Amino acid sequence: MTSDTKPVVLIVDDDEEIRTQLKWALTDAYEIVLAGNRMEAVEAFKNSKPSVVLLDLGMPPMPAGPEEGMAALSALRGIDSKAKVIILSGQSDRANALRAVNEGAYDFLSKPPEIDELKVMVRRACQMRQIERELADMQAILGDAGFEGMLGSSPQISAVFEQIRKVATSQAPVLLLGESGVGKEMVARAIHRKSQRPEGPFVAINCGAIPENLLESELFGHEKGAFTGAHTTRPGRIETASGGTLFLDEMGELPLNLQVKLLRFLQEQRIERVGGRKEIDVDTRVIAATNVDLKRAMQEGKFREDLFYRVAVISIRIPPLRERPGDAALLAHNFLKRFSNESGKPELRFANSSVRAIEQHNWPGNVRELENRVRRAVIMAEGNSVRPSDLELASGGSPQPQPGRSLKDARDELERQMIEDALKRHDGKISPAAADLGISRPTFYELMDRHGIKRPS
């Protein structure tokens, strides 16, 4: 069984001395399980459910070749396709180690591994495995849709979920505050579905997307002949939403004359169509949203104070993605699962450097930006691994430049620049430079050779 306090690491090697050395290096931070051959490894894997496996390729009965190690990798991934298997191989066996990575291994290290490099790689593999387990646990509890279509486990978004539960059953207007792309309409729909009127209509209108001269008619409707082109009587969005919920997105863009009419509707639950003389009773709950500072707009005379206090009976601030620790990776894995299945690429997975880039990126476009980047990455990915360049992210998390040349040239230039920058930051020392980029030392050497970067003497 897995430990309640330490992640489990399974070490698979037929050399008892190497097993002992690795155990000694990792035992302070991990619960260590040992195996000397493929059969023992499979049995230990089933019983201990390790977060990470350190696997030697050369094992009996064919210790001189990689066949037994590759068979063990296949068997372990057959039990758990998300298993994080780090290959241990000799310098002369790099080709087989790369083959193992292509077949699903997390990464590889040359034997004997440097202890600091080993610890960094195991720690990052454990972190990725934990993220994937949290996502799986959440989906098992909530289903793929999460909480009313929203996914997240951070305290910040959990607090929003709790606020939704509390306000949904009331009839009070709600004001949603947050940056563009945080999911304000999804929150509004969640409130509607959990309200006492879920069978009623949910009608959304973006107040900033409709020309001012048409907005009044869109909201309140018009009578036949009210203006040129009004050939028939037409109910507006407020009336259409009767018995349900009206979602006013970008409410801060409402012109002042319409703010007056909206305030009257909120006070009296009655409207008059444009060109009409008869008041119409309407039973509509209003949820408004804005990404502008309405209090500042009030000070500047652009938004009515009485309307603000009428519509903001309950305010919910939806935090940006950068304030939701851990949620970006959870959401990214969820989007990857959805888009890869839709695209017929169910084996796609994030490279460890991609997860690191996702966690470090500031996400100015919030969840919408993340979703779009993952959708693009699924299309652009080669093989079974999504790289930071597929997401248009550098490994440090910053957006990737887009020069006017081929994607391969852009990738190569970015990769070379990142290798050179890492070497400069660490005074030419390979191990810390590789750890900084989230790759193994052999992989770092391979990239240096590929890009013609001279190895430090």
Image (cartoon, rainbow, N blue to C red):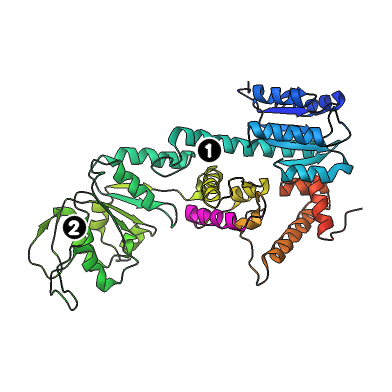
Report whether 19 appears left or right of 146.
Answer: right
| Rendered location of residue 363, percent (x, y) | 54, 54
| Rendered location of residue 59, percent (x, y) | 83, 30
Residue flagged by tag 1: what amino acid is it? Leu
Q: CA distance from mark 2 to mark 1?
A: 41 Å
Where residue 97 sits, quadrant-wise, is top right
- Prevailing secondary structure class for the magenta stretch in the rendered image: helix
Residue on which disc 2 sits = 239
**Image height check: is 229 above or below 163?**
below
Residue occupying the point 23% across, 60% down: 237
Residue on which disc 1 sits = 135
- Of 394 and 37, nearer the camera is 37
Dot 1: element:
helix
Residue occupying the point 11% across, 58% down: 280
| Rendered location of residue 15, percent (x, y) | 86, 26
Report whether 90 appears left or right of 221.
Answer: right
Which label is found at residue 405?
none
